[in-house]
Image (cartoon, helix red, strand yellow):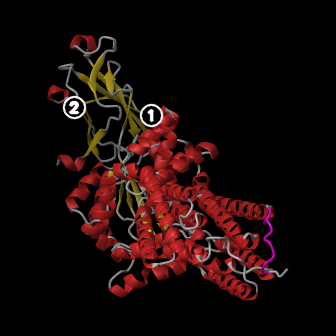
Amino acid sequence: MSEASAPEQAPGRWGWIVVGAVIAIELAALTSYARREIAWAYPGFYDQCAYITMSYDIVTDAAARGLVPALRAHLAREQPTGVLLPLQAAAHCLIFGHDRVSLLSVNFVHLAVLQCALAGTLVWLTRSWWPALTAVGLTLPLRTVFLPTGGAFDLRMDFGAFCLYGVFLCALVRSRLLVNPRGAAAVGACAAVAVLFRFITAAYLAALLTTLGAGLLAWRFARRDPAARAMAARRLRGLLITAGVLALAAGPVLYNQRKAIRAYYVVGHVTSSEKDIRRAEVGLREWADDALFYPLALRVHTGPAFWWAAVAVGTIGAAGAFLTARAARPGTRGLIPVVAALGFGAPFLVLNANAVKSPVVANVLLPPLVLAALAPLTVGRGRLASAGAVAALALGLGGLLEHLAAPGPFVAADARVSVKLLDDLIETRGRKGFEAPEVFNDACTHDVTGLGLQILEFERTGRWVRYPDGTPIFAGDEEDHMRRLARCEFVVLKGVPAGQFRYPYDEQMERMRPRLKAYCDERMEKVGEYRILGRTVTTYVRRALRAEGVSGDGWVTADGVQLVGTGADLRGCARIELARTAMPNFLGRTDVRAEVEVHGRATRTLPVTVADDLRSVTIDWEPVDLPADAPVVIRVRFTESFRPAERGLPPADTRALVMHVGPRPRVLLHPVSADR
């Protein structure tokens, strides 16, 4: 009996051992690389910081209120891009601990799932482990894994979305292009997971399924062969099953998030001026830039090692097909080329139709490229197939080791200075007692941000402290920026490093820099100066006193309140003001006494002014020469108080109360210049 007509033997399970060993080595290497090059540094890029913050929000909320309320709160928030990534990342944190490697392991697992899906699909299709091992080998040298933005070490949706899209394409192959109803339902389930992970995937799948449906309808009515017409009808029914499962699983979530999706994609990418800023950011000026953008981005995501491996595999596969053709599994002839063409064409058209382009999202085009490179192996057999697998694994592991040996995305010296800067701000926050300090940044750069501070403090200490940071990309009004500056606890004057894109906000800040620096030098306390990426970064903290003795619900009691700080906080100060909240004045009038205690000096009484209706208590401070680190305590006592029951408030509260200043009272320090 000839080789071409010999009965097929079962491929066995030995291949899964090899696949498992390769993935285990890969996961160990990626984890080691993450600890060595990534986890010690600040979290870069706004998108990553936003998703890490969402993930840690779920973790802290689950610890405070329970897992189910935390999940409900997450799903109820407006999320324009997807809902699954923070849930998965939070689950990894709950299992492995709240650190950066636990978060990034979400990406590592997605990559392993894609590799298993490719291996399982190829061994099912070809009844041989050699093409399956080749498929795994082709994913190893992909440069996208190590890209600073959108790679496996950047927690954003792009990497997981590319892996899940590849799993969807594998399911499409396994269903014999939707012939099998169960297979079609599985394709719909994979599609739903991909859409819930990243909403824009719905546009890719809509284009793909619409194109497929149009082709099947044309085939159904153009062919005269009854068998071909029946096959097209079965696939159309499978298409309806897939679309139905996708709509039932993902439709309610998309509908619930419709306003957020519209604001992000329609307003942000189409109707507002933001799209012009985003286009300028990536260098899009004329039609040729748009036409070449994604082909050039795809070259970055693949890397030369992938193309060498793909050419070798394609050549070996073509030779094998010419010498010893393999009998196709029934209903699978031509499946890989069709799925690869649909899988590449649909997202490519959607991405190019969008005026706003990003090189990060181009990795969604990688799975169909891998399938296209594997197509020749699905029709050949014999020793050449094993040679292709060995070549792919060797080139793949070599490419992986080359990436692992290279330095990480951070310039080590500058990144360590940036971490020192962030640690100094975190330490200052703790010393000042700020509960939720707002950060003013004079540039849209990713090295020092409010979210980065929030994440780093949580990973360092386990404390979940919010650092609001309203840095925009638009120029805005100068006086609005000055008002925002006046209310911020931290200010970071850093500018944009040479060679980086400048947003309109950055240009506005550059024009305002003398005014910003003069304000900070006069009214704020300098934390430090740092040399990062060729520019001097200066950080400031608002001079402030910490109010101690206030109850948890924001009341000053008959015991009074202590205003605590240092000599540096009071430098240049003329008046200290403690203001009442919007809650009514239940007390009426009262006399107030303030005494200041400074180590090594006699206690003295300070003049106090009580505003009408007890709106505020203002203490006059006479500037004195105090060491910057000299502790200062101002004790404020009231002669009158009231019991809640006396004012018609809940009688269960028996405390003697004075005024409501809020659980996070802000003590205002008025500078000398403000009184002149």
In space, the residues marked 2 and 1 are separated at their CA atoms by: 36 Å
Quarter occupied by residue 2: bottom right
Tag count: 2
Give the dominant element type of the magenta stretch: helix, strand or loop: loop
Q: Where does residue 645 sit, x and y in percent of width and height?
A: 26, 11
Does residue 475 appear to the left or right of 567 in the view shown?
left
According to the picture, the residue beneath numbered tag 1 turns out to be 599
The segment highlighted magenta reads: 4-12
Q: Answer yes or no: is residue 448 visible.
A: no
The residue carrying pointer 1 sits among few (fewer than 14), some (14 to 19) or many (20 or more) residues within 10 Å by Cα, namely: few
Q: Position of residue 208 (x, y in %)?
A: 45, 69
Depth check: give the residue in front, 521 or 210.
210
Q: Quadrant of residue 606?
A: top left
Lateral position of residue 396 relative to residue 158, left or right: right
Image spot of residue 666 (x, y percent): 31, 38
SS of the residue under disc 2 = loop
Q: Relative to 196, does residue 362 appear above or below in the rendering?
A: below
